Amino acid sequence: MSDATDEFTAVFREFAGTGLRDVWSFDVESERCLYIRRDVAERLEGHDPARYIDNERYGFITRHTYDDLTYADYEYTVRGFDEFTTFRTFFDGFGVLASVDADADIAFDALYETLRNTEYAHGDDTGLIDDYTAAADD
């Protein structure tokens, strides 16, 4: 794992604890799993996470649409599902998508601010999209 992977994963673990399910980074062409909990990895067998992340890539376009439609800047999106909640945000050239257990109590605004203040949220060479092997917990 790279320093960027470790730092981003640590931020999510700080906010979600054992409720953290997975963390992905992506750009317009590729995606990288930074972290995935073992039970989540098992449930994804037979599913294609890249297809789901393809849908999240629309955020590269829609976040600019929101900037044009509102007087406030886009920061992040939260979606609730029956078994988990997703959090998505964008930084310089890449996006981050994570999921937490549905019952996890997360201060998403504070999570966003903490991520935004990491050194890896700014700059072209973050190391968050390079080739990887995902880390999984038991």
Image: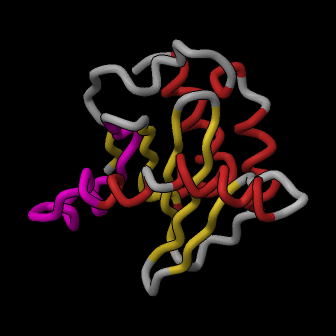
24 relative to 86 in the view: left or right: left
Where's residue 80, x and y in %?
54, 79
Q: Residue at x 65, y 40 (%)?
A: 11
Q: How is the image coloured?
A: secondary structure
Q: Nearer the viewer, residue 118 or 9?
A: 118
Where's residue 82, x and y in %?
45, 86
Is residue 2 found inside the magenta-colored segment of the image? no
Residue placed furthest toward the bottom: 82
Q: Which residues are magenta?
A: 30-51
Picture layout, residue 114 above or below residue 78: above
Badge count:
0
Where's residue 95, x and y in %?
52, 41
State the image quarter where residue 38 is shown: bottom left
Q: Nearer the viewer, residue 29 or 8?
A: 29
Residue placed furthest toward the top: 125
Q: Nearer the viewer, residue 95 or 41?
A: 95
Residue placed furthest toward the left: 46
Residue placed furthest toward the right: 71
Q: Nearer the viewer, residue 135 or 50?
A: 50
Q: Residue at x 70, y 38 (%)?
A: 115
Where's residue 52, x and y in %?
31, 61
Q: Residue at x 64, y 53 (%)?
A: 63
Q: Residue at x 53, y 44 (%)?
A: 96
Picture layout, residue 126 above or below residue 55: above
- Quarter of the picture containing the N terminus is top left
